[in-house]
Structure formats: C-alpha cells, structure tokens
Image (spheres, rainbow, N blue to C red):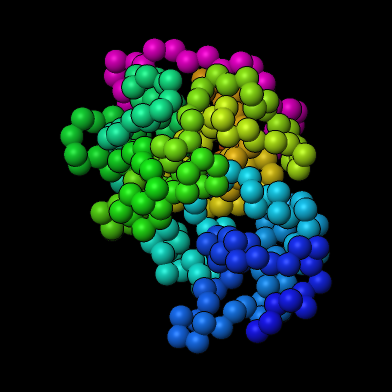
C-alpha cells in the first residue's frame, strides 16, 4: 500500500489522489481498513487520465499532468469506474423519452455583470445548438415543473456534488432518467460568469502553456452547451475538438454561428436521430470561426422549434 516508490516527478499527494477518485480514475479508499491505493493502481489511474486528457501516457505525475488537473472543468467523472458508478451522474446513459422539453432558469448568478435576460438568452441559444440538429425541442416555462431546472449555486447545494470556489469544478448536469433531478443543470456561482470576454481567445489546439485567469471569468455560453449535452444524455469524450471534452477551453464564438464539432453531432444523432431539416454530412474540413460573439435580444417565443 505504500505509494512512495512510484516513479513520479511529483509524489501523489492526497489532493491528486482525491482528484483521480473524484473523476472516476481510482476507486475510493476502503473506509474500513483505510488502505491507500497501490503503486499499480495509481500508475494505471494516472496513465488513463493522461490518455483521456490528450497527454503522453507515461503514468508519471509530471508538470503537464498537474497543470491539466488544475484546469477548470466539469464536475462529472470522465470514467464510469467503481468510484463513479455510485453516483447518479454516472448511471448507465439514458435519453429522454419525449421530444418536447421545458426549461427554466430558477436562480441567477449574483456576482456576474450579466443581466437576467442575457443569462436566459444564453441558455436559450445553448439549448438551440442541440435542438437545431436533433428532433428535440426546448421551451422556456415559468413554473416549477420544468424538465431542465437551471441554478447558479455555491459550495454545498444539497445535490451531493458541492462546488469548490473559483476555478476547479465550474458546473454539472444530471443525465436523463426517472429521478427528480434528471436534466437539472447547476453552475458554480463562485465563478465570474462572462460573455463576449476578450480574455480567453478561441483555441484550435490544446496548449498546456495556456493560463486561465479565474478573475476574468468563465464563458457562460460555452459551459452551458457542454452541460446541456449531459442533460440530454452525452458523457465526456476525450476528443480535443469536442464540446464534451471535460476541460474548459474558452469561448466558442457567436451563439448564432456556433456549429457543434462533428464528433458531438454523431454521438447525439446516435441517441435521438437527425432533425428532418438537417442532412448529415462527412466531417467538415477547415478551421472554426473566431468571430466576436454577438447576442440578439431574447425572442418573444422562447421555443427552439425552428
């Protein structure tokens, strides 16, 4: 059970072991014996994390691996391993058995400069990204019975998945299912949520020298698109271009022009099929648009039905 013999650049601290457990790479320690992870278990966990994160799979807790662990990210696990299967977030993936889904922003960010209408508009367009290519339709409602309840919460907010202050885990969503939290989406209100931020340029490749200055905020639209992917049934994926990659990668551009990466389109089509007005095509070539985001007024009819 001794871990000091691992061939690591940095010994595996309790923080790094907790991180690996939290995101599904390690089983939790035995609560009865208090036994720590073995050398082999830790090496396998670090290797799996590196592969999923697009790093060289060395099994060594090096600087690049530690930097990736520090990157702001989604709360949901990456691997449906023993540590993850105990949680509602990582049930066997399901999908909604209806095509018309309601949503509501129940609580709003308290520290952000974004107004309520802007937050609602960003939620509308983040959901529309998914409904534009699938048979799903999303409708904003005012009552308490929305399928997707959206909240901005801090620390322990009574769902078993506490937030951890600025940086770290920034949001999570519950998969579809028969539990009362199905589809619910929570954003960490200790983050400074932004839109049209010039601090984070859109990246076309993974750069481990990239710095995320938390003081300048998290792009709400980009994170919302990711979380709503979970709310309709998608898990994390390791593809660097995917919006379902667990790590925050900055703004994705104008909500009216944003086009899902091909990997994400294929995965959501496998769950729900293709909207009749959409023609599946081969994987497109070329770079993503980097237009400065523009956000129109929230439409009067807040439904994503074309």
Q: Is residue 23 above or below residue 237?
A: below
**What residue sits 42% from the left and 21% below the top?**
114
Residue 208 or residue 297, whichever sits in front: 208
> Is 9 situated above or below 269?
below
Residue 203 part of the magenta segment: no
Percent x, y for residue 9? 81, 63
* Residue 214 image position (x, y, % from top left): 58, 34
Q: Count up the numbered dots.
A: 0
Task: Write the residue at 56% across / 30% down.
Answer: 215
- Please name whichever residue, 238 or 14, is drawn nearer the observer in this view of the structure: 14
Q: Is residue 295 magenta?
A: yes
**Magenta region:** 282-306
Residue 260 vs 301, above or below: the answer is below
Residue lying furthest bottom in this view? 33
Q: Is residue 286 visible?
A: yes
How far from the left and from the top, in percent, is residue 49?
67, 60
Which residue corresponds to the image point at 36% horizontal and 37% vertical from the top-left? 152
Residue plotted at (49% across, 66% down) = 84
From the top left corner, tell me how far across and down residue 56 is, in percent: 80, 57
Q: Is residue 273 visible?
A: no
The quarter in which the N terminus is drawn is bottom right
């Amino acid at each position: 059970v001794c871990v000091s013999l691992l061939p690591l650049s940095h010994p595996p601290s309790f923080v790094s072991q907790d991180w690996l457990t939290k995101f599904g790479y390690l089983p939790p320690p035995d609560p009865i014996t208090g036994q720590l992870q073995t050398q082999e278990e830790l090496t396998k966990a670090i290797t799996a994390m590196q592969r999923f994160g697009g790093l060289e799979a060395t099994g060594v807790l090096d600087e690049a691996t530690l930097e990736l662990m520090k990157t702001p990210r989604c709360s949901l696990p990456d691997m449906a391993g023993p540590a993850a299967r105990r949680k509602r977030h990582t049930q066997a993936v399901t999908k909604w058995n209806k095509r018309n889904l309601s949503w509501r922003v129940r609580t709003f960010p308290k520290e952000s400069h974004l107004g309520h209408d802007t937050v609602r508009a960003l939620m509308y367009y983040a959901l529309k990204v998914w409904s534009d290519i699938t048979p799903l339709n999303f409708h904003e409602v005012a009552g308490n019975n929305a399928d997707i309840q959206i909240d901005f919460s801090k620390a322990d907010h009574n769902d078993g998945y506490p937030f951890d202050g600025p940086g770290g885990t920034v949001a999570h969503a519950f998969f579809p299912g028969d539990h009362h939290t199905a589809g619910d989406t929570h954003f960490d209100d200790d983050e400074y949520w932004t839109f049209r931020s010039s601090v984070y340029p859109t990246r076309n490749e993974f750069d481990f020298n990239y710095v995320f200055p938390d003081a300048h905020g998290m792009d709400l639209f980009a994170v919302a698109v990711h979380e709503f992917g979970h709310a309709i049934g998608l898990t994390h994926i390791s593809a660097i271009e995917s919006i379902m990659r667990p790590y925050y990668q900055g703004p994705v551009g104008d909500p009216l022009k944003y086009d899902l990466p091909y990997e994400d389109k294929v995965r959501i089509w496998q769950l729900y099929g293709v909207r009749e007005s959409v023609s599946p095509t081969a994987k497109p070539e070329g770079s993503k648009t980097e237009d400065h985001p523009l956000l129109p007024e929230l439409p009067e009819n807040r439904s994503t039905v074309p």
